[in-house]
Image (cartoon, coloured by chain):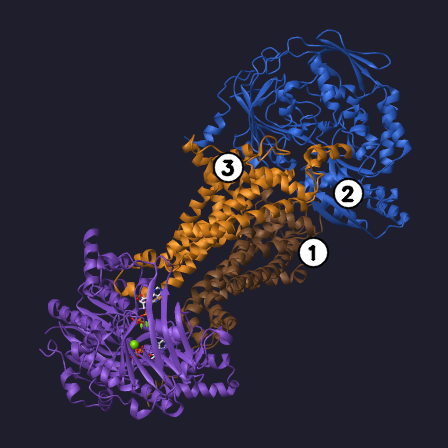
Amino acid sequence: MRTFLLKRLPSGLLVLALASFLVFLILRLIPGDPATTLAGPDASPATVAAIRGRLGLDQPLFGQYVSWLGHLLSGDLGPSYAIGGQVSDLIGNGLGATVQLTLGALLLVVLIALPLGVVGATTRRGPVAAAVQAVTTGVLAVPPFVTGVLLVLLFAVSFELLPAGGHESLLAEPDLAVQYLAMPALCLALPSAAVLARYLKDGIERALAEDYVRTATALGVSRRRIVWRHALPNALPSAVTVLGLQIGHLVAGAVLVERIFAWPGLGQLIEQGVLRRDYPLVQDLLLLVVAVYVAVQLLTDLAYTWLDPRIRWE
Amino acid sequence: RSAVEHARNAAGAVDADSPRRGGVLTVATGIDITPSLLFAVSANTLVQRLAFNTLTRYDDRLRPQPELATAWEVSPDGLNVTLRLREDVLFHSGRRFTADDVVFAVRNLQNPARSAQLRSTAATVTDFRKNGDFELTLVLAHPVSNLFDLFEFMIVPDRESIEDAVTGTRLIGTGPFALTGRKPGSSLSFARNEQYWNPGRPHLDGVEIRIIPQAESLLSSLRTGQTHLSYNVRGKDAATLVDDPRFRIKQYDTGSGAHYIGVDVTAEHVRDKRVRQAIAWAVDRDRLVQQALGGYGTVSSVPWPKSSPAYTEAGATHYRHDPERARALLREAGAEHITLPFAHSNEAGPTAIAQILQYDLRQVGIETVLQPADSPTMQKQLISQSMPALWTLSHGFAQLQPATLAVSAYPFNEARNSSRFASPAYTDVVQRAWNRSDSDSPEARALHQQITDVLLDEEFVIDLAIAGLVEVAGRRARGVTLNKFGYLNLDDAYLTA
Amino acid sequence: MTTAALPLKSAAPRGRYRAALLSPRGLTGLVLVGAVALAGLLAPLLTGTDPNAQSALALAGPGAAHPFGTDDLGRDLYSRVLHGIGTDLALIVTAVPVGALLGCSAALLAATSRWADLAVQRAFDLLLAFPGLILALAVTAVLGPGRWPVVIVIALAEIPGYGRQLRAGILVQREREYALAARVGGASRARVLLRHVLPNAVDPLIVQTAVALSLGVFIEGAMSFLGLGVRPPEPTLGSILSQSVAYLATHPTFAAAPLAATTALVLGFTLIAEALNRGIRR
Amino acid sequence: MTTVLRVTDLTVRFGDSDSQGATAVDGVSFDLGAGDTLGIVGESGSGKSTTALALLRMLPPGGRITAGSVHLAGQDLAALPETALRALRGRRIAMVFQDPMSSLNPVLTVGRQLDEALRAHGGTRRKAERRARAAELLDLVGIPDAAGRLRDHPHRFSGGQRQRIMIALALAHDAEVLVADEPTTALDPTVQQQILRLLTRINRETGTALVVISHDLGVIARTCRRLLVMRHGRVVESGATAEVLAQPEHPYTRELLAAVPRLEEPSRAAANSTPGTRPLLTVRGLTKTYGSRRRAVTALHGVDLDLHPGETLGLVGESGSGKSTLARALVQAHPPSGGSIRFRGEELGRGARRDGPHREVQLVFQDPYSSLNPRMTAGQIIAEPLIAHRLGDREQRAARVAELLEQVGLDPAVADRHPRAFSGGQRQRIGIARALAPEPSVLVCDEPVSALDVSVQAQVIELLARLQRELGLAVLFIAHDLAVVRRVSHRIAVMHRGRIVETGPADRVVTAPEHPYTAELLAAVPGLEPAPAASR
Ligand SMILES: Nc1ncnc2c1ncn2[C@@H]1O[C@H](COP(=O)(O)OP(=O)(O)OP(=O)(O)O)[C@@H](O)[C@H]1O
Ligand SMILES: Nc1ncnc2c1ncn2[C@@H]1O[C@H](COP(=O)(O)OP(=O)(O)OP(=O)(O)O)[C@@H](O)[C@H]1O
Ligand SMILES: [Mg+2]
Ligand SMILES: [Mg+2]
């Protein structure tokens, strides 16, 4: 385990370094300029130039990159250009909400996908199979920006069951927070859950055709147990891979979902930052996302070796 | 506990129909403030008049009323303006407001970094003469017709915390509410300023500004009672709420800006002004107002809203939907089958407008290639004069003294604009309209008419419609007003049960 | 001499795929996808209305003149949806194979050496770690709006999915004894990989492809929603849907037709994938 | 004696339609009384496994019971609904599958799988009790440190051990009928003896009726009172084991008995060919360590070996002693950790031919199930080495494939069937055909005949002998059936715990073993005379 981590760490760091460069470059590829957004709609070119000077945007690109990295490594994220305040505070404020949202969604993904996948793999025809098919299809066919608005119209406007948007801290007000969380998390989770359910279903069907299932059947193990205890564990390693991939989609999806539900998380912050070309903020945020993602991949690989004992750590 | 109830109760239970103390008013807006643009008019100007005050305030007919300045006097030559200030005003920090703060406020706007649109007007103030702490004379380089636009525009900040203000961490002013918390991209919270100079005001305990970027979600938050007030409801959504007794909808005739087609007058084909006029004739403005603005807007060929001194019926209706005439003009100009690039913002609303315009132009033989871009990109192109031949955007600043438009709004700026339009005649008439101390004399009106005539003839900015500024308020929110720049004034606002 | 005289022939793989597609499930899928695709391909024949022709009659409900009603700019939704299907299919049919090809090549490359594997894996991480919004913004910014950025973003998004699935399959299969046997028989590394391991490792890619095709429509929609999609006024299912969102409460029929089309496509892809999978396992 | 299992007229067909299909089991009938023991022997591919699977209605996809019935305690298993059938499986009728490698769940620990078996029928035992019972079962089948190994996953066990775990699973419920399909193919004589004793004991003590399928008549003779001989899906002869063995009636049975190699028979190798003097293959100090440094398993400890042209070297040894590891090292399938392998004096894995196995050294894999590519047809599999070594054009290859199939006793028409559609023994022969395809001069056979009935086995041995005679083929013959090994080998090497403990002329090693382990092995070999328990 420790050797595994030690082996993976350098490549992880390399990814981060590469990512930092890409992040930096991509932002500068996008047209528009933080100075013009800062200067406002009716500013004169002189003002813009002055702001560029103040922000150091007139420096050579490589110099800007190095100075950003330097600050980053010294732990000083510096001030944001356009949103105001320190980048570290901004990220700190949004982090909780986003973690709440993505973890909530992740939980829902698993809770939805597992039964859908299992039932999908075991029932071939009949109303249940049709219902499962309908759900997995519908959810993948309706994009989240429609789902989100529909959910709000249904549960907030018509039935007045849940608030239309907003956020409460799970730690401070757990009972309210859950109600605020319900719709955004669901909206975020549904597409990933449908995808995961697909793979689970496929994996379970595959496992059910294997000889060891024949063994279990011959032992008289009940169908239910065969599916859950014998076939499912064999489908899990690949499902975990897919889940790892889906976490990337969750983070990307958070941008959209946070927007629809006015959720004060990092997704909103990224969007705001991009819309205002707040370079330091977006750079740091994206790098954070990359870091989280690299960590998630590491975890999935660990989970993989844990779920499939045949795979060794070398 | 139900979060739905909880969200509504955030407003506090107040039961009478008369102005009552208490409650937190929740305002929904589509976009967060940009702290660095605190001293400029930007997409979100809700906070300016909450945390700050201005020197004077316009009434409905652009007549100044006292705020921090209780009296004022302009010398006959228009070069000296003497202001008498309130003496009982404290900043949120507890410091007393004096003439020095006005001096600072004006100097602050002269700083290009503040990006104040009325910087040119502020820059005419060359000297300050104080008579004690509460009287002050501003010395101007030349008379200007839009001085009180400046006083309506200029918020008076605390000079000690100005750097915190432009980073959005602390807003110290003299206004009715003090900023208590900001979650960037999400919300701003304000609490009542207990030492507010206006006695008994404000009624509200606090104000919460919620940023809800998704238009549908913003509407839902109003409909569920989670928020009480918004100015960002799309016209087409407002239209669906008109008959709903839970809402009051008010349209300000100052407009929230005007939609226009900008033209690069140096670009091929459109450098001929007949082509530009043809475009003006080609657009079906009525359909645009109906389909893109949900009927909340006024068809207009000029920038001026009805409230402007420069408004004339003839000017507003100068160009109508007349494809025949457009075709004739194009024929005359020898530009019958042309293709032009056409930039627009990639948000849903502007994209719809651009498509309508594209379709109308095609009907007269002008093909356009739409170039959607996000707003920072548009803005950069606008400021750096790198727009393609055509673009569509909206502009402000026509709701005030007409001279302000031509010296402060970038599309119309006589010295430098995105259209690369320059004409001595335009410069001359603009300067004359601006360099005078009055704006409602017959002479001034004649100058305004001349400006209008130039605009209508040259059509480097092709005005299409004045967008309605729509206030959608839940039944419970009362006494809400905006100033001419869209600063939210909640001095007299209250919540009913 | 004893011969197990049972000349029982197992169907050739191609035959099995065909049989799978002709199962009720597969046929339903084919019919669904075929019908939608045909409608998209034949759009110019099926409707004489210009999909971009506007009129004052905005947001009309379904009727004789406009079978699906009109959109907010008075354009005929029937014509727009049909043309939109064509555009979407063109997009995903170019993007998904490209993404699949790149992803699979990367997975094969990863199978050649430990270093290649590490590099490819980390490249996937990198590709996945960027939120789609940023990727879409950057690509659109560089290329300008249009079809290609959408194709590229979809393709980029599919690469890691294909790559990882295939890599996982290859890792498992290559340890199987038949691969070793092939090597002992003298097959080169490339031949072992391509001829022996690959055919056994591609099964999960069937589901992957169904999901990828569905996600293609999905991504196109998200990009349209963010204003980064195909250049307006060209209709796409995603752009029609994102327009319709504003009218979900007041004019729900606006969204109905594009949703029906995407649902039929997704369901069709799923059914075909399931049928193929069952065919293989049989 | 009451009848617990009555099989009447059982018929199984493979394939979709009748025209295309094939009858694998054709009207098989037999009765099994409580506490009875029945052996099924027969030709490879004669339908033994299919019969066994049909008893529990667990046929692979494509297989259907088209006629007949299987009555277990009055219920017809062939017609019972699935749920009712489930209640019987494992509890009243249990089964050991022929292929232990893929029949254990790779991601569940052995303890979990035993636990699942124990709780399958709603047993009221508590967790600790089940655990104790699981350990007891593992111990019964002779797995050392049973309690400790419950936590291990199947891949940590050797082939023979896995086979025994399968048996332990089947023993979980003291079923009335236990069907064991080739339960001892992967076991060396000592362990085999232990397992057969266990089965006999269970039969005696709990009255479990046994159905043992084996191609090894010695195993049947030792465990079963009655015997059934199958061929082409039909029962050709049945009766008491002792009688059938003593006076076979059907010509096939006679043929079978005649083909049974006996340990007492001297080696025929010398008569077949005379080995050359210069060794073809020289192995010196070969070591092989599996796993990482911390959890290393050393499978080979400095093995020395010489193989001469035209020679057959028999290799016997305990299960898990490193025979397969050695075989793989010889064909360059796994790089050795130390030592050298020289072929015609040239070091393998060095110099010019660095990257890959040598055409002239081929291997027949031990596991006929996993070593055949499931996506290829038998013909393609056999043709692979020809393509790889660019031997012949398409038609020549097809001809060669047909020839090879014929040589190993398969109909050339089966060339376009996939491995799934073959029986265990048939697959093994496909593996042999593949190894022979590129005309090697050294053939390493890892248990090439373990799943073959004696007549096919004889045929394969004759094929190898002919190749040796005509082409001077050198064979390393790994097997646990000492009689076969003695018969085919010039010399025999005995392996024990990664070392070769004894090498010598075949007859000498069998008649006068020097190493105690060799003696132990020899003592455990089952003969054809029925065991005392069976002759009650
Ligand atoms: N891949 C592996 N990783 C770790 N250990 C292994 C591996 N393969 C084999 N071993 C171990 O190496 C030893 C020798 O295994 P090998 O397969 O050579 O035995 P064998 O003599 O062929 O036995 P059998 O007669 O059961 O086939 C065994 O103890 C086994 O547990
Ligand atoms: N899945 C299948 N599809 C088609 N034919 C099959 C299938 N499985 C087995 N067969 C055929 O059925 C016949 C009987 O096979 P079975 O496995 O019962 O033989 P067996 O007697 O157990 O032989 P062995 O001793 O070699 O294991 C064989 O000829 C085989 O080719
Ligand atoms: Mg068999
Ligand atoms: Mg072995």
The chain whose colour is brown is C
Q: Which residue is mark 3?
A: A95
| Mark 1 surroundings: few (<14), some (14-19) or many (≥20) residues within 10 A | some
Identify the mark at residue C49; answer none if there is no mark: 1
Going by the picture, which residue comes out furthest to the left? D536
Q: To which chain does the residue with label 1 belong?
A: C
The chain whose colour is blue is B
Q: Please report contact status of discs 2 and 1: CB closer than 8 Å, yes or no.
A: no
The chain whose colour is purple is D
Residues under labels 2 and 1: Cα distance?
Answer: 34 Å
Identify residue type, mark 1.
Answer: Thr
Please tell me whether mark 2 sits on a helix, a strand or a loop: loop
| Mark 2 surroundings: few (<14), some (14-19) or many (≥20) residues within 10 A | many
Residues under labels 3 and 2: Cα distance?
Answer: 38 Å
Q: Position of residue D526 (x, y in %)?
A: 18, 79
In the image, is residue B55 above or below residue C83? above
Q: To which chain does the residue with label 2 belong?
A: B
